[in-house]
Image: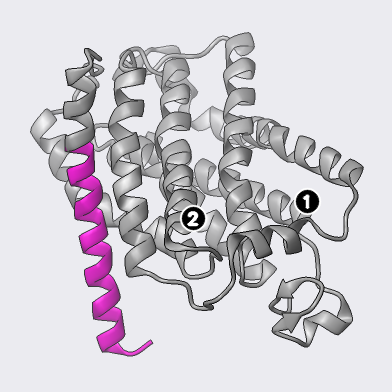
């Protein structure tokens, strides 16, 4: 990539980040108008400083979506919808669900969900517009037919079922590895954190796992790039979307908590991305792998 193109893309990310930040303000105003209450600030947090961190780090969230945008099939509306839905679920809904478990101040669930919906829609649309697909001409319908061809309904049923619950064991295993480094903060209720009950943790974790799979499936269906790039880019996107509200902008948390949790989220999302790619994508046949256009499968890149 040449310097000029790099500067242009950085400018686009800055614009998309500003669009996201403005969207949170519009969404917050809309949530207030319908009578929803925002959660109180975390212990040690300052509202003005939180807004500043959100504004400065908003291009990271735009970058998460831009990682995927150029290799998605479909019209502008289809691509914008896929990106917006992924951002809303991963960045907002799943984060708020986890907040219900591990924080003592996360009482504004529906306010945050409405606030982030507007921001996700605007940012997803901006990214889809400013980062158009590298390969044009393929509809989302054609991508869907190519994605689901070659496997029977029974095979898809068990694969999607496993994908829907796969995040649960990944979260538990990686969490157990990180737990010795962070347990003291949760046991002592430091920084507004609390240790969740196991039964409640399992229930909400299962809901999060299903939501993650639901948000990622349209990305897999519309993907036009290679399996390797899908694994890497989806992993990066999920990591940034999940870590953005809970780690990157949580400036009041000490680094002794932020570093272990950052590594935890990084491992969670890349392992989960690998599981989704392994379960739900397939290699092109030898005859199709040499072609960009295949009569049976549509447009295919070699994997």
Vertical order, 153 against 32 (above or below): below
4 inside magenta stretch: yes
Query: In terms of depth relative to the viewer, which is nearer, 194 or 75?
Result: 75
Residue 241 in percent (x, y) is at 42, 46
Name the quarter where the N terminus is drawn.
bottom left
Residue 231 in percent (x, y) is at 63, 61
**Neighbourhood count class around disc 1 (C-alpha, 10 Å): few under 14, some 14–19, many 20 upward:** some
Query: Residue at the spot x=45%, y=52% of the render?
Result: 83
Name the quarter where the C terminus is drawn.
bottom right
Instruction: Name which of mark 1 and mark 2 comes first in the sequence.
Output: 2
Q: Which mark is residue 78?
A: 2
174 inside magenta stretch: no
> Left or right: where does residue 182 sit relative to residue 254?
right
Coloring basis for residues: one colour
Rendered image quadrant of residue 28: top left
Vertical order, 166 against 146 (above or below): above
Q: Nearer the viewer, mark 1 or mark 2?
A: 2
Query: Residue at the spot x=78%, y=87% of the render?
Result: 290
Query: In terms of depth relative to the viewer, which is nearer, 32 or 247?
Result: 32
Q: Residue furthest left?
A: 48
> Left or right: where does residue 226 sit relative to residue 101?
right
**Predominant secondary structure in magenta?**
helix
Query: Residue at the spot x=52%, y=77% of the render?
Result: 136
**Neighbourhood count class around disc 2 (C-alpha, 10 Å): few under 14, some 14–19, many 20 upward:** some
Residue 87 in percent (x, y) is at 42, 45
Label 1 sits on a secondary structure element that is helix
Residue 197 in percent (x, y) is at 56, 9
Rendered image quadrant of residue 288: bottom right
Residues rendered magenta in the picture = 1-25
Return the residue at label 1: 279
Report how far apart the C-alphas of labels 1 and 2 lie in the structure: 24 Å
Rendered image quadrant of residue 167: top right
């Amino acid at each position: 990539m040449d310097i000029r193109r790099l500067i242009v893309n950085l400018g686009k990310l800055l614009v998309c980040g500003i669009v996201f930040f403005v969207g949170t303000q519009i969404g917050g105003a809309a949530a207030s108008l319908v009578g929803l209450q925002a959660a109180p600030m975390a212990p040690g947090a300052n509202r003005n400083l939180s807004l500043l961190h959100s504004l400065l780090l908003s291009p990271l969230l735009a970058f998460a979506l831009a990682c995927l945008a150029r290799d998605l099939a479909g019209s502008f509306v289809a691509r914008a919808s896929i990106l917006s839905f992924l951002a809303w679920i991963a960045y907002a809904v799943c984060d708020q669900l986890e907040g219900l478990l591990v924080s003592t101040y996360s009482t504004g669930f529906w306010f945050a969900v409405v606030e982030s919906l507007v921001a996700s829609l605007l940012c997803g649309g901006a990214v889809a517009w400013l980062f158009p697909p590298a390969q044009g001409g393929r509809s989302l319908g054609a991508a869907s037919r190519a994605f689901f061809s070659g496997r029977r309904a029974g095979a898809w049923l068990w694969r999607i079922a496993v994908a829907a619950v796969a995040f649960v064991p990944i979260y538990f295993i990686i969490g157990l590895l990180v737990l010795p480094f962070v347990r003291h903060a949760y046991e002592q209720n430091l920084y507004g954190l609390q240790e969740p009950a196991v039964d409640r943790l399992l229930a909400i974790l299962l809901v999060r796992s299903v939501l993650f799979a639901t948000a990622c499936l349209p990305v897999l269906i519309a993907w036009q790039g290679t399996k390797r790039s899908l694994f890497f880019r989806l992993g990066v996107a999920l990591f940034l979307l999940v870590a953005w509200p809970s780690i990157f902008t949580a400036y009041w948390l000490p680094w002794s908590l932020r570093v272990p949790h950052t590594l935890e989220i990084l491992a969670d999302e890349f392992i989960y991305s690998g599981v989704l790619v392994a379960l739900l994508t397939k290699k092109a046949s030898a005859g199709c792998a040499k072609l960009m256009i295949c009569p049976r499968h549509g447009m295919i890149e070699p994997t």
